[in-house]
Structure formats: C-alpha cells, structure tokens
Image: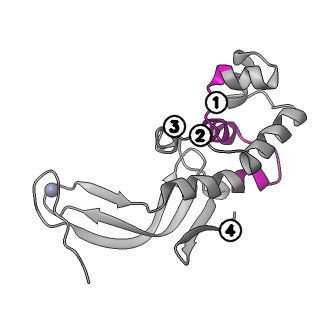
Amino acid sequence: MTVSVKCLECGTPMETSIGPYRYGRGIDVLLHGIETRRCPECGEEEVVIPKIEELHRVISHAIARRSGQLKPREIRFLRTYLGYSSVDFANLLGVTPETVSRWERANKPQQMGKPAERLLRMLARFGEPSRTYDLEAILLSDSKPSENEAFRFSRAGGDWELSEFC
Ligand SMILES: [Zn+2]
C-alpha cells in the first residue's frame, strides 16, 4: 500500500523511490534502502531516514571499532555524539580547546595522542550518547565525500546494521 505524500511547497503528489543514500558527507556514510521523495513539479526533495538515533549509535560504534587513526571528522562526530563541547572535551582529556580544534580541522590536523584516542573510542562504544547533540548539522555539512572511506549501513529486521567497512 502506498500513501501519496504531497509536496509541502506546492501540494503536488511526490514521487517516491527507494535506493542508496549518502547520509554523512563528512564521514561518508552510505545507507541502503532509503526512501527519497521528489516533487515532479518544483523539485523539492525529502529523505526518509528511520530510527535516526539508532543510526547515529551504530555509526559511532563503527567509527570506534575501526582500525587505524581516527580522522578529524570522526573525532568531531564522536565528540558531538557524546554531547561534549570542544571546551568540555578539552577539560575531560586535559588538553587545551585549541588542541581539540587542531585534531578536528580538515587541513593538516594534529594527530590525536593514543591515550586520548583510546578514551574517545571507549566512550563512544560504552558511554551514553547525549540527548541534545546536533549531529545532523555535522552530517549534512559541507566537505566532499571520499569514495574509499565509506561506512555502509543497511536495515536488517528494522534495525540499522553495519554492512561493510570500505
Ligand atoms: Zn513541489
């Protein structure tokens, strides 16, 4: 059964398609089986992403379990997922806020020390996420996707699952 959804902008019935969707441009997350609605009249688009908190949790766990150095965007993603401001995060780890911004900057980032990185991974895996984080702003922000670093997720039995590290 298909429910026809009308465009919020112009009221035209929207066309629905199901397919892969690149969700996190910053950390490059590819989701499978995502419903996208497009208005044939005005071009307005809507993306339906179910269970978004669960999705953010599995993305965080996937980053935390990945081998290799954390990338600046991943550090920022995990910090935000856990609900720390740069200042709070700096205080937690005993570094300056400037150090945190150097870890997270895209150009010539400073490498995060091993103890700090391990702690962040532990918190991301076993800590409680913040209820007030604003990950959408990060995930939908500007940086270009990198084809070779995608995490891919699909829904199995309604729950989000990591399908592969690329
Ligand atoms: Zn429209």
> Nearest the camera: 101 or 124?
124
Among numbered discs 3 and 4, the one appearing first in the sequence: 3
Q: Are marks 3 and 1 in contact (CB under 8 Å)?
A: no
Q: Work out whether mark 3 precedes mark 1 in sequence or the reverse, and give the earlier one.
A: 1
Element at badge 2? loop
Q: Which residue is mark 4?
A: 164
Residues in magenta, as a range: 62-87
Distance CA(mark 2)–CA(mark 4): 26 Å
Q: Residue at x 64, y 32 (%)?
A: 106
- Confirm if mark 1 falls within 8 A of ligand 1: no
Q: Which mark is residue 84?
A: 1
Q: Amino acid at mark 2?
A: Ser
**Mark 4 or mark 2, which is nearer the start of the sequence?**
2
Alpha carbon of mark 1 to alpha carbon of mark 4: how far? 28 Å
Give the prevailing secondary structure in the magenta stretch.
helix
Q: Give the residue at mark 3.
A: 132
- Asked whether residue 71 is drawn in magenta, I would say yes
Q: Amino acid at mark 1?
A: Tyr
Q: Amino acid at mark 3?
A: Thr
Q: Are marks 3 and 2 in contact (CB under 8 Å)?
A: yes
Quadrant assignment for the C terminus: bottom right
**Structural distance between the alpha carbons of marks 1 and 2:** 8 Å
Q: Tag 2: Cα neighbours inside 10 Å, few (<14), some, or many (≥20)? A: few
Is disc 4 surrounded by few (<14), some (14 to 19) or many (20+) residues within 10 Å? Answer: few
